[in-house]
Image (cartoon, rainbow, N blue to C red):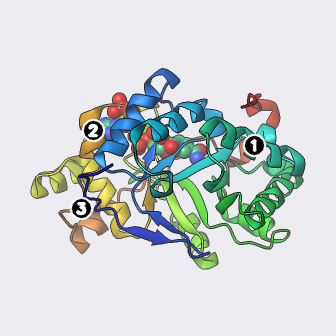
Amino acid sequence: MEGVTNPVPTLTLNNGVEMPTLGYGVFQTPPDETVAAVEAALATGYRHIDTAAAYGNEREVGEAIHRSGVERSDVFLETKVWISDYGYDATLHAFDKSAGKLGVEVIDLLILHQPLPTAFERTTEAYRALETLLADGKVRAIGVSNFMPDHLTRLMEHASIVPAVNQVEVHPYFAQPDVQAADADRGILTQAWSPIGGITAYRDTGTGSVFEDPTITTIAEAHGKSAAQVMLRWHLQAGRSAIPKSVKAHRIAENFDVFDFELTPDQITAIDALDTGVRGGPEPADVTLEAFGRDIPEA
Ligand code: NDP
């Protein structure tokens, strides 16, 4: 696509692959809205899309990329293997399912969606399949999601390749500094899910919505920006990857318009102090096949 000047800087993953700092997420985007939403994101300038087998919209993400006119090589495509497809052979096949639905030969970043703490050998076997896919050139980078520091330790007792990314819940009300430190110690990039704290608004976490936090709205007013834009700067200035989601064109644009201002160190400190320690998503230790397993359809 011509005419889009792309301001998004990139982060260099631990294997040298470049990934745009700011991406676009599609969790809870209904399949029948996904093509239009992802096309709007690509037209806005996003060049990194985060989906998952479990979101049920990989086919529509692929269709949007195909229709957009943006070169495949200009889009960083990230997806996730669901726990029901863990195990060496099952995870190799999960790649075929996702790549088939996405309509691509190569996935830029393939990650394990959750650890399975009570069936960890399935998790390590799934990761071993990711290592094979990487060696075979079918994926350009591999990683994990919702891994706590002890899960990383257990994984690395078996794995030979350090995950490039750990995608975890990070927003001002739940920043997981211990996880971020454990990632950094191992050379793993922390990628923030629910980066603008959407989960504090669409789920009752008991903390209230971070969009209405007075510290954040005051900082936003000082910059003539929105609360979401301030939160995205907070990630970018910390060197984290962030993947905000919206199905609304004006918010897709708003969440991308974050490259023309800078938070001061005091403002960053004030946002850091908002951490409540209250998780919005499921406790990783509670994720089991029995409770969360579900069939991922063939391509
Ligand atoms: P976000 O922090 O991106 O917030 C999204 C929510 O906020 C939506 O309800 C959206 O509504 C609304 N919103 C978006 N932009 C704005 C704005 N500028 N002002 C006010 N409201 C806004 O939360 P998500 O939980 O969606 O996380 C983002 C992505 O992270 C997901 O799409 C997915 O890719 C990934 N993710 C990964 C998980 C994992 O386990 N690995 C778990 C959860 C998310 P609307 O669409 O109506 O604009």
Residue occupied by mark 3: 259
Identity of the residue drawn at 33% across and 37% down: 40
Vertical relation: 220 (above or below) 140: above
| Left or right: 78, with 220 as reference point | right
Residue occupied by mark 1: 96
Identity of the residue drawn at 83% across and 61% down: 128
Q: Residues within 10 Å of mark 1 (few under 14, many from 20)?
A: some
The foreground one among 298 and 83 is 298
Q: Position of residue 29 (x, y in %)?
A: 47, 29
Badge 1 vs badge 3, beta-carbon distance below 8 Å: no
Say whether disc 3 or disc 2 marks the residue closer to the N-terminus.
Answer: 2
| Left or right: 76, with 259 as reference point | right
Residue occupied by mark 2: 251
The reply to whether the residue tagged 1 has its Cβ within 8 angstroms of ligand 1 is no
Q: Residues within 10 Å of mark 3 (few under 14, many from 20)?
A: few
Q: How far apart are marks 1 and 3 (CA)?
A: 36 Å
